[in-house]
Image (tube, coloured by chain):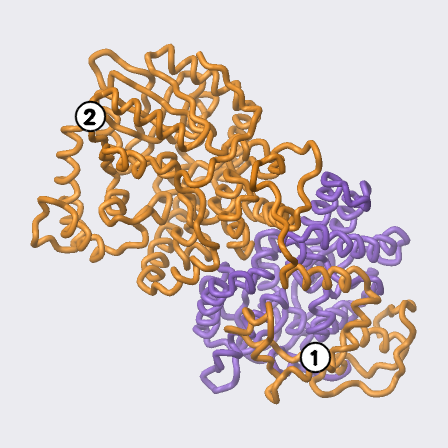
Chain colours: A purple, B orange
């Protein structure tokens, strides 16, 4: 299958290794990965902050960057290693396009944008969704060679859990990684407190939510907290780092993206460096 | 018979009642967060109710169908509200009741005052009512020499404590029993000075105190959970029996009901009497459900009044993106699952309606242009737990985002498109507020430019090595200026990578990049390989 990678702006700029791990997994399964060069961002930060006018060109760019490849058959589906960005593409793009038409006035409202955005949204998948529902991955060790010795816990980010209804897809995949012990996170369904600009506009409440999430992660005794959204992981990781949280063995408690765990193999196991895990070396 | 005209959306005038906050949410939240006892009380209470609700909801195999039914009945009722209200008035009047219409808090309060004065009584008993809380009726009556006694236990605690409710269902959720005992000792005239904080003894003290009020009261004021248009029936749902006492003993009964509480048919109660108790108290069935239809000679109150209250509801109704907030049945399930409410409590919201529903309802009732409430739509991380819990499926996160958009438009003086319903631009004095660009405006404006083109983002990403200089030797950024300072207050930011994915991918496609994973290795900027021109087919296919 030909798969377009939507890296998302934050992964592209801050966590390129998560996109690299996504490419590794998909290529290991024998699929062709395409990176539409015009892509930039889903616009979620603008949308969720109420800046619909500023979100509009970002949304238009995303639709433009991806629709041509769908139409020409260059790729069949798109994937992003981010539940919240996929939720935005699927649920918010058509909404903001509709908003622009209703508001009018700006002279740039495109009446076809909502339908075009919807078409792109329908063919865009979050990583665990694509792996499970489209590519039929049910055993990461057997199908991807995933291997990682250690103990992790998993935080199911709000948008993946509630807007995309990912359910136990990510956890099921993690449980099939060889040598990996997955422990349950207490109050896993509680928001970590990131919420985009919420963490800035309501920094105090966000910090209080983060403190409880960090305490719950550390209470599991796991060496790392895995997740499917780098923004939430950046938030949780930022709190773990600031509090200097360590495991019983004295190593810092890390955050790691699902893609990085799945990309880890016996030959090139995941190693930790800085806030995030890394998948080492060339395959 | 009055003529119903719901065509002119009314916004509550400022300075009346309790739906307009007096300070921005972040400021109030900061204060409330500093109260460790409050946080402990709230965390304990919300977790208990939350778990109970989940248990009893999971017992019903048709819960989702019930939610759909509740949502559909409400949507139908809102779509023909004028017709249903007229029908309600006809039926209520035909059975001996009197209907009054109030556009706002001032009108509603004046009507109630006039009705109480006509009885000659100086005292009234009250059964917990959100609508009278909203319009500030107790304070209004108090100022005019009429004493209103709350009879709901939690509401009594709040009233005696000279406090405001912090929760729709559990107004004293922020108080623990020691604090309650202290309030009783200080404020109840005949209380046993040896009173302990044992729940049973506290309840007995309240009972003795309240019984005197019930037996002497000539006038009662209630809210209503439902008004049935088909039969002109009013309904109150409560747990302690205090409501039953208020609704049956006095001679005069005055009910203040928001106009959105109307349901078309008696049969609709079937759905809501399943949804409401499970969602609010985690109970299978409600302990005391009182329904009354008009007046019956020689039995119960002989003078039965209802004040139908608008106070911004037609404004909310005219807002087609926000109107479903009026579907709310005040169960409080959303606040019990909200991580923001759990940590700040209800007072931070500055309105009778706290939590997620309050964050949309208060601005919808007052108009988001009313600056007092414009910080409320941002008081959420958009986690969506409220939407999942709502028994009538109000999409609270979506409405929060929509209201943020309205707020940004209003702040920038962009106004609404001509002719759009609910237009606030015709309001005197508070229609438009064009403010100077904030840091957020500047930051998001610049980000919009950068993020609406792959080329621009790619160009900016070439500055990543420079941004890395912000990080300390440990590879962390622990202090950022301006807006981002809020972030680094409690969180580090990792050092950016030396190269973006986009750049790595381009090099890989042209054979200039080293193996997978190296591109992001700390300190290991891949050498060589002049960057290919912008916009070339930066793609690569096939497994190796």
What residue is shown at x 26% (from left), y 48% (from top)?
B162
- Give the mark, 2 or 1, whose residue is nearer the N terminus: 2
For residue A181, say whether it is visible. Answer: no
Q: Position of residue B263 (x, y in %)?
A: 46, 25
From the image, tell me which residue sits under label 2: B121
Q: Chain of mark 1?
A: B
Place residue B19 in its image quadrant: top left
For residue B491, say whether it is visible. Answer: yes
- Is B70 situated above or below B449? above
Say whether residue B114 is left or right of residue A108: left
Q: Chain of mark 2?
A: B
Q: Position of residue A59 (x, y in %)?
A: 76, 53
Closest to the observer: B67 or B393?
B393
Q: Which mark is residue B506?
A: none
Q: Position of residue B230 (x, y in %)?
A: 44, 17
Q: Position of residue B305 (x, y in %)?
A: 33, 20
> Nearer the viewer's eye, disc 2 or disc 1?
2
Q: Which mark is residue B467?
A: 1
State which quarter of the image contains the N terminus of chain A. Answer: bottom right
What residue is shown at x 32% (from left), y 24% (from top)?
B291
Closest to the observer: B198 or B487?
B487
Cα separation between marks 2 and 1: 73 Å
How many marks are shown on the rendered structure?
A: 2
Closest to the observer: A206 or B62?
A206
Say whether residue B208 is left or right of residue B227: left
- Is A75 situated above or below A151? above
What residue is shown at x 46% (from left), y 14% (from top)?
B2
Residue at disc 1, secondary structure = helix
Marks 2 & 1, CB-CB < 8 Å contact: no
């Amino acid at each position: 299958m030909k798969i377009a990678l939507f890296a998302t702006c934050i992964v592209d700029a801050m966590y390129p290794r998560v996109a690299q791990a996504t490419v590794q997994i998909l290529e290991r399964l024998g699929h062709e990965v395409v990176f539409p060069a015009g892509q930039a961002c889903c616009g979620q930060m603008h949308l969720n902050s109420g800046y619909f006018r500023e979100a509009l060109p970002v949304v238009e760019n995303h639709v433009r960057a991806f629709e041509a490849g769908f139409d020409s058959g260059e790729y069949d589906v798109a994937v992003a290693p981010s539940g919240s960005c996929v939720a935005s593409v699927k649920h918010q793009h058509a909404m903001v396009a509709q908003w622009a038409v209703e508001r009018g006035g700006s002279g740039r409202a495109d009446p076809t944008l909502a339908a075009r955005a919807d078409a792109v949204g329908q063919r865009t998948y979050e990583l665990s969704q694509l792996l499970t529902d489209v590519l039929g991955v049910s055993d990461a060790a057997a199908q991807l060679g995933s291997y990682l010795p250690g103990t992790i816990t998993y935080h199911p980010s709000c948008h993946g859990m509630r807007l995309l209804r990912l359910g136990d897809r990510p956890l099921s995949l993690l449980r099939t990684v060889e040598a990996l012990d997955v422990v349950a996170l207490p109050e896993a369904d509680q928001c970590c407190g990131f919420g985009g600009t919420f963490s800035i506009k309501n920094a105090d409440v966000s910090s209080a939510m983060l403190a409880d999430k960090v305490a719950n992660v550390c209470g599991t005794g796991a060496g790392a907290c895995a997740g499917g959204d780098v923004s939430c992981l950046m938030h949780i990781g930022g709190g773990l780092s600031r509090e200097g949280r360590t495991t019983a063995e004295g190593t810092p408690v890390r955050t790691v993206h699902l893609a990085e765990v799945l990309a880890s193999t016996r030959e090139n196991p995941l190693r930790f460096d800085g806030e995030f895990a890394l998948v080492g070396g060339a395959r | 018979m009055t003529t119903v005209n719901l065509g002119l959306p009314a916004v509550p005038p400022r300075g009346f009642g309790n739906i307009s906050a007096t300070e921005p949410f972040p400021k109030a939240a900061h204060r409330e967060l500093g109260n460790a006892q409050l946080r402990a009380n709230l965390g304990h209470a919300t977790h208990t109710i939350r778990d109970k609700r989940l248990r009893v909801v999971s017992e019903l195999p048709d819960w989702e169908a019930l939610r759909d039914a509740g949502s559909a009945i409400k949507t139908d009722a809102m779509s023909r509200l004028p017709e249903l209200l007229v029908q309600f008035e006809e039926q209520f009047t035909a059975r001996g009741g009197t209907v009054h219409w109030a556009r706002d808090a001032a009108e509603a309060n004046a009507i109630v005052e006039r009705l109480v004065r006509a009885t000659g009584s100086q005292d009234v008993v009250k059964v917990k009512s959100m609508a009278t809380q909203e319009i500030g009726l107790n304070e209004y009556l108090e100022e005019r020499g009429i004493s209103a006694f709350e009879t709901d236990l939690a509401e009594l605690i709040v009233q005696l404590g000279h406090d405001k409710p912090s929760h729709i269902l559990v107004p004293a959720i922020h108080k623990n029993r020691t604090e309650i005992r202290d309030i009783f000792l200080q404020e109840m005239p005949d209380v046993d000075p040896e009173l302990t904080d044992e729940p049973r003894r506290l309840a007995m003290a309240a009972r003795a105190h309240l019984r005197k009020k019930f037996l002497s009261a000539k006038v009662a004021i209630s809210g209503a959970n439902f008004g049935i248009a088909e039969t002109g029936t009013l309904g109150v749902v409560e747990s302690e029996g205090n409501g039953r006492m208020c609704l049956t003993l006095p001679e005069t009964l005055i009910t203040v009901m928001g106009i959105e509480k109307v349901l078309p048919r008696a049969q609709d109660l079937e759905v809501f009497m399943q949804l409401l108790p499970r969602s609010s108290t985690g109970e299978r069935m409600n302990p005391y459900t009182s329904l009354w239809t008009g007046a019956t000679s020689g039995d119960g109150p002989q003078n039965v009044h209802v004040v139908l209250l608008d106070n911004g509801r037609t404004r909310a109704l005219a807002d087609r993106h926000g109107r479903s907030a009026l579907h709310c049945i005040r169960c409080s399930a959303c606040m019990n699952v909200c991580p923001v409410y759990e940590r700040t409590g209800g007072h931070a919201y500055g309105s009778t309606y706290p939590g997620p529903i309050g964050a949309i309802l208060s601005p919808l009732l007052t108009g988001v242009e009313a600056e007092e409430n414009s910080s409320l739509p941002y008081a959420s991380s958009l986690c969506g737990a409220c939407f999942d819990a709502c028994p009538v499926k109000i999409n609270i996160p979506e409405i929060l985002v929509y209201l943020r958009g309205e707020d940004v438009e209003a702040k920038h003086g962009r106004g609404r498109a001509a002719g759009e319903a609910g237009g606030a631009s015709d309001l005197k004095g508070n229609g438009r507020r064009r403010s100077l660009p904030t840091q957020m405006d500047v930051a998001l404006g610049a980000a919009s430019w950068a993020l609406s083109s792959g080329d621009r983002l790619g160009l900016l990403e070439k500055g990543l090595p420079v941004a890395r200089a912000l990080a300390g030797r440990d590879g962390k950024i622990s202090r950022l200026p301006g807006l981002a300072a809020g972030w680094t207050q409690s969180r580090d930011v990792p050092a950016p990578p030396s190269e973006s994915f986009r750049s790595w991918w381009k090099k890989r496609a042209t054979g200039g990049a080293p193996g997978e994973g190296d591109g992001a290795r700390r300190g290991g900027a891949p050498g060589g390989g002049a960057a290919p021109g912008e916009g070339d087919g930066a793609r690569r296919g096939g497994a190796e």
